[in-house]
Image (cartoon, grey):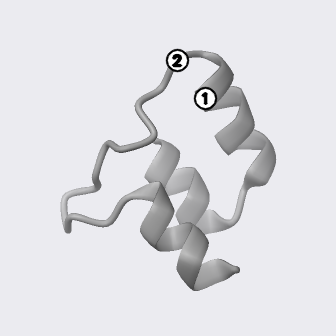
Amino acid sequence: PVADAAQRGDVEEVRTLLRGGADVNAAQGDGMTALHWASLNG
């Protein structure tokens, strides 16, 4: 979920998920993580 929100550029959703304890390192099916999307989206 964090990677999905990061892919969409939804900063507020990323914050909400992280506050709720979501795993920031969880990868999507293609192996992309929130860090990958953040680096691509700036």
**Screen quadrant of the N terminus:** top left
Task: Left or right? Give the position of 41 relative to 26.
Answer: right
Contact between labelled residues 1 and 2, with CB atoms less than 8 Å apart: yes
* Residue at x 31%, y 66% (from the top left corner): 32
Question: Who's the residue at 61% across and 29% down the image?
Answer: 17
The residue furthest right is: 12
Three-letter code for the amino acid on which mark 1 is drawn: Leu
Give the side of residue 28 with respect to residue 30, left or right. Answer: right
- Residue found at the very far top of the displayed protein: 20
Q: Nearer the viewer, residue 17 or 36?
A: 36
Say which residue appears at 72% left-offset and 56% top-offset.
10
Check residue 40 in the rendering and tell me which mark sits there, or answer none: none
Give the distance between the C-alpha atoms of the residues marked 2 and 1, in whole angstroms. Answer: 5 Å
Q: Write the residue at 58% across / 52% down.
A: 5
Query: In the image, is residue 38 above or below residue 4?
Result: below
Mark 2 element type: loop
Mark sitting on residue 21: 2
The residue that mark 1 highlights is: 18
Callout count: 2
Disc 1 residue crowd, few under 14, some 14–19, many 20+, Cα 10 Å: some
Name the side, left or right, on which 18 lies relative to 35. right
**Image position, residue 29 (x, y; %):** 19, 58
Q: Quadrant of the C terminus?
A: bottom right
**SS for tag 1?**
helix
Where 16 falls versus 10 (above or below)?
above
- Around disc 2, counting alpha carbons within 10 Å, would you say few (fewer than 14), some (14 to 19), or many (20 or more)? few
Which kind of residue does numbered mark 2 sit on? Gly
Residue 37 in picture, x, y percent from top left:
51, 71
Q: Position of residue 31 (x, y in %)?
A: 21, 64
